Amino acid sequence: MFDQLNLVVEDVDAVIAFYRKLGLKIEDDGREWPPGSGARHIELEFPNGNRIEFDSASMAKVWRGDSKPGVVIGFSVESRDAVDTLYANLVNSGHKTVKSPHDAFWGARYAIVKDPAGNDVGLMSPIDQSKRSKQPDP
């Protein structure tokens, strides 16, 4: 099920200012972590459960493996195994991989593939607290 847009941006402050002007209530400016790294993450959840997230290029390198600006269209799947199965189905039918299924530091099983238009599409299981690990350095 579609539930997320993640925007990887070069200038987090400019993007936050823009979306605030459009009426989004962004209260968190995304603290830099670790200090001096440039890695920032801001997440807004809407009443229907959909989310929009903003990540600096440095933060994207942590979870996506590269730091190029762009959009990741997020889909939630029902289980960790479902991430692997859906990923395999998409890749076996000719779609390109960006990031193969792995246990992400935030506790979800996660993978990224390209859609036919070249957009990144994230596949994410529910978060399992027991699978959380230390966030890698950017």
Image (cartoon, rainbow, N blue to C red):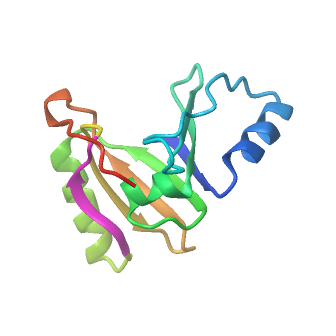
Q: Is residue 92 above or below residue 130?
A: below
Nearest the eye: 18 or 33: 33
Magenta residue span? 97-105
> Residue at (26%, 76%) from the top-left corner?
92
Q: Is residue 119 above or below residue 17?
A: below
As drawn, the residue found furthest toward the front would be 36
Q: How many marks?
A: 0
Residue 32 at x, y percent in the picture: 52, 39
> Residue at (43%, 60%) from the top-left corner?
61
Quadrant containing the C terminus is bottom left
Nearest the eye: 70 or 85: 70
As drawn, the residue found furthest toward the top would be 47
Q: Is residue 46 in the magenta section? A: no
> Residue at (31%, 43%) from the top-left corner?
77
As drawn, the residue found furthest toward the right would be 21
Residue 111 at x, y percent in the picture: 31, 57
Left or right, 127 with reference to 5: left
Nearest the eye: 82 or 112: 112
Residue 127 at x, y percent in the picture: 27, 33
Quadrant containing the N terminus is top left
Residue 79 at x, y percent in the picture: 21, 40
Residue 135 figure quarter: top left
> Residue at (39%, 66%) from the top-left corner?
113
Left or right, 54 with reference to 63: right
Q: Main secondary structure of the magenta part?
A: strand
Left or right, 17 with reference to 11: right
Nearest the eye: 64 or 119: 64
